Amino acid sequence: MGMHAYGDAPAADAIVERAIAGIGAEIDAMSVPKLRGVVLGGGYARGEGGVKTAPDGSQKLSNDLDFYVVAEDGSSAADFAAIAASLSAVAERWSAKLSVDVDFSPAKTPWRMKHDEERIMIQELVHAWCDVAGLPGKELFAHIVRRAPQELPWMEAARLLMNRGIGLLLASAGGDPGFVARNLNKCVLGAGDAELVAAGKYAWKAEDRAAALGDAMYSAALEWKFRPRPEAPFTRGEARARWLAAFARVMDAGRAQGALRRSVRQAARWVARRRTLGELGTFGRDCTVRVLASTARAVETGSPLSPSLKKDWEIFN
C-alpha cells in the first residue's frame, strides 16, 4: 500500500520509508517462530502522519509509528511472549533513533482478527497498511471482509469514546505538557469520530470526517495533529465539554438502535472477569457501555481516574 505524510513533507516520507526498510530487515533476520507478518498501520500508513518542522526547515515525525503483528493460528502463550520479546528490542532501538515511540501491537492470530473484523482498528488497518516483514498484508488480511465505514457498529462509537474519555482523565491529572496536549487533542478528535460512527456517517479519511462534522473545534484538533505545537488549541474545560456533548449524542443513538439492552450474557461476562457486580444501574449492559458510563461520571464530576475504573478499562477495552 502507498504511504505519505500529511501535506507536503517529503523529508518525513523518507524517514518513514527508511524506518520501514530497516525495521523490516531486522525482523526478517530474526526468523521469529510463529510470526506470520508485520505491517505499519495508523496515521502514517493512511497518509495522515504528523510532521514537525524546525526553524531551519528540517522535518521529523511527530506521531507514534504503529506496527501490527500477526501470529500463526494455534500459537501458544509462550509463542506470543517470544514474539513480543523479540520485537521489544527492535522497538527500543528504533524509538531512540526516531525520537518517537515505535509500537508493536500484541500479536493477533488470523482467527482473532476475523473475530474482531467489525472493530474500527481492524477495518482501518485492512483499508490502509504498509508491508514491513514476513507475509504481505494482502495475504495476512485476505480473510477479512472489508466494510464501508458507515457499516461500523454502534459499539465502536462507545469503545472509541471510552478510550478518549480515559485519556482525558489522564490528561486532567497533569504531568508532561506534551502528554496532556496530545490527549486533549485526541479527546476532541475521538468525540467527533464517535458521533459519526454512532450516526452511520464515519469516513476513512480524516478530511472527509471533518467535512461531515462541520465542527471548528474538530478541524482545529485535526490541524494540530498534523502540525503539532507545544500547546493544544483548546483548554481542558473545552475538551471536557466536547466529550460530554458527544457522550450524550452517542448514548441517544445507542438507545434508538437498541444497543443498551441488558442481557444475562453480558452480566455473566462482567462477573466472570471482575468478580463483582459493579454499578447496579448498568448491570447487564454491554461491558464497554458500563465502563463508558463510569468514565462519563468521572469526567462530569471532575473526579480522578480511580484504580477500579482503570482496571475496568484495561479488562474491557
Image: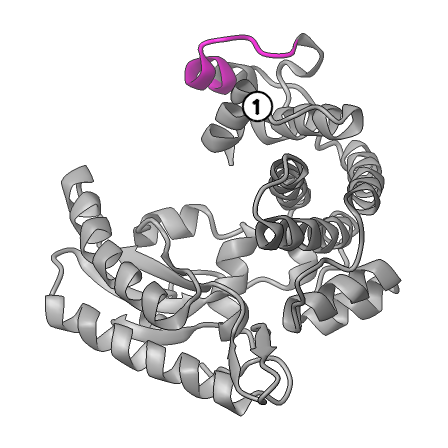
| Residue at (68% x, 45% y) in the render | 157
Label 1 Cα neighbours within 10 Å, binned few <14 / some 14-19 / many ≥20 = some
- 306 or 157: nearer the viewer: 306
Tell me where residue 114 appears, x and y as whole percent: 41, 51
Q: What colouring does the structure picture have?
A: one colour
Provide residue 167's location: percent of width, then percent of height: 61, 42
260, 192: nearer the viewer: 192
> Please, is residue 121 above or below residue 270 in the view?
below
| Magenta region includes residue 275 | yes
Q: Position of residue 210 (x, y in %)?
A: 79, 67
Which residue: 58% across, 21% down? Answer: 306
**Image: magenta residue range:** 269-279
In the picture, the quarter occupied by the N terminus is bottom left
Q: Is residue 313 magenta?
A: no
Amino acid carrying mark 1 in the image: Leu
- Above or below, 247 against 46 in this view is above
Return the residue nearer the eye: 216 or 206.
Answer: 216
| Residue 160 shows in this picture | yes
Looking at the image, which residue sits at the far front?
55
**Placement of 80 over or under 261, stated as above or below:** below
- Quadrant of res 30: bottom left
Please give left or right for residue 30 compared with residue 197 in the image. left
- Quick one: SS at disc 1? helix
Q: Residue at x 57, y 26 (%)?
A: 287
Write down the residue under mark 1. Answer: 309
Residue 289, position in %: x, y? 65, 29
